[in-house]
Image (spheres, grey):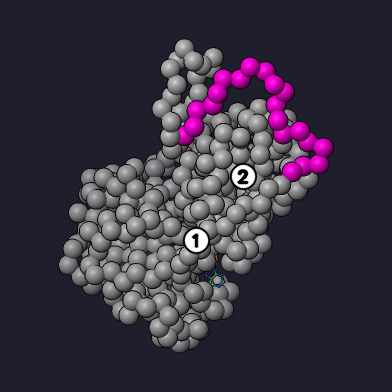
Amino acid sequence: MADPAREAPKRFEEMDLSPAMMKALVKANYEEPTPVQAGVIPTALEGVDVIGQARTGTGKTASFVIPILEDLLPKREAPGPQGLILVPTRELAVQVRDEVVKLASGRRIQCVALYGGKPIRGQIEKLKDGPQVVVGTPGRLLDHIGRGTLRLGDLWCVVLDEADRMLDIGFRPDIERILRKCPEENRQTLLLSATVPPPILRLAQRYMHEPVTLNFSEGDVSVETIDQLYFTVDHDRKFDLLVKLLERENPAQAIIFCRTKRGVDRLLRRLSKKFKSVNAIHGDMQQSARDRVMKSFRGAKLQVLVATDVVGRGIDVTGISHIINFDVPEFCDDYVHRVGRTGRMGREGVAYTFVNPEEGPQLTRIEQRINRLLKRDEIEGFDASAPVIEEPKKEKSEAPPPPESAMKRRPKRYRRAL
Ligand code: ADP
Ligand code: MG
């Protein structure tokens, strides 16, 4: 059963799905299952726990949504939520909720997204209507659990989407608290991600019952249809390079990733003077502003989005043609997720990473992780090195900071900032 090569169904028709689900799939224009769907759906329908790894943009969401929707009990038997989907960000909560609604089309199934930054009242009202499926971010879910507004007694399926992120140190205590409140007996747990590092895989077993591991990205975690390049550029020349690159490429839609929220704000200010269709998103913005920006980006009304890793995971916007890592991501798995916002479902995409001369080791780590070399790119006539002025030596990511006396300017220490 643990063998992904076992007779995987090639068509949804071979999966024994309900007529309502088949109709919803036609309506969604899902003609054939993707490999992860062909592997995970039948396995999950058997009721076993699954750890599923598959590349970005290959339909992991439907692979857990379909088995949940197929096995929902009538409300009179289970009035509380039956499926709980945990996600790391608010924007992803909304997107996954929309996928549930899409796949539940034509049926009386309700799904609610519970996430912070929105008044809790409205969410409590929606919970009173008895949704069968709940999608949420950990903090707000705990809030509802604490208030007694989210009942977990009828839950039989719990999903961790972006599982490695959810079980990574930041979220782990919250996740553990939530899982402790969920029924143990007969609970099915599904974990999905494009990247599942071995320590997380071992940790995951603690929350699962004899999980089946299905890996659809063995040996290569990154998507082949994404062209991946890098520029060597001095720190002070990055902005000018970005302007040149955007002019050269004129992307249909692009995300430019920065490491910090302040970096995002600063870059937005500078870019707005040069380009019209630019906006930003990060975790310090008001939720209403985040929603507005995402709406215009999803609707292709916004061409360039400057962002932190808050949109690094899971976000699915078809029009994204370009990813630009203005700052090299701190963790190489974050690289995989960032560039995975393009090249979804077999589409083409291109990802550029700006690397300053001190960041060679980070580039190498990324190349080792994705098991391929990034190609070097250059812009004709553009000098990527800054004019030589006495520059303090930049700090390498693992090296301890040099003594203060040795620096003119204190190098920034980056933390994961969403
Ligand atoms: P992942 O979670 O693996 O990154 P998503 O679940 O976000 O990928 O799906 C990526 C895109 O593919 C979405 O736009 C989704 O609607 C679409 N999609 C999913 N399954 C299918 C399918 N079987 N056929 C066509 N499109 C699909
Ligand atoms: Mg996903």
Q: In x, y percent, where is residue 132?
A: 33, 65
Q: Which residues are magenta?
A: 378-397
Q: In x, y percent, where is residue 223?
A: 57, 62
Q: In x, y percent, where is residue 20?
A: 45, 80
Q: CA distance from mark 1 to mark 2?
A: 18 Å
Give residue 96's mark: none
Give residue 353's mark: 2
Q: Residue at x 17, y 67 (%)?
A: 185
Name the residue tied to disc 1.
221
Q: Residue at x 28, y 69 (%)?
A: 211
Query: Are dots 1 and 2 in contact, CB under 8 Å?
Result: no
Can I make out residue 138 in this image?
no
**Image mark count:** 2
Give the camera-side residue of 311 and 102: 311
Under tag 2, what secondary structure?
strand
Residue 7's image quarter?
bottom left
Q: Residue at x 43, y 57 (%)?
A: 195
Q: Quadrant of the N terminus?
A: bottom left
Q: Residue furthest left?
A: 185
Tag 1: amino acid: Val
Q: Residue furthest top?
A: 405
Q: Residue furthest right?
A: 381
Residue 207's image quarter?
bottom left
Position of 263 relative to 317 (above/below): above
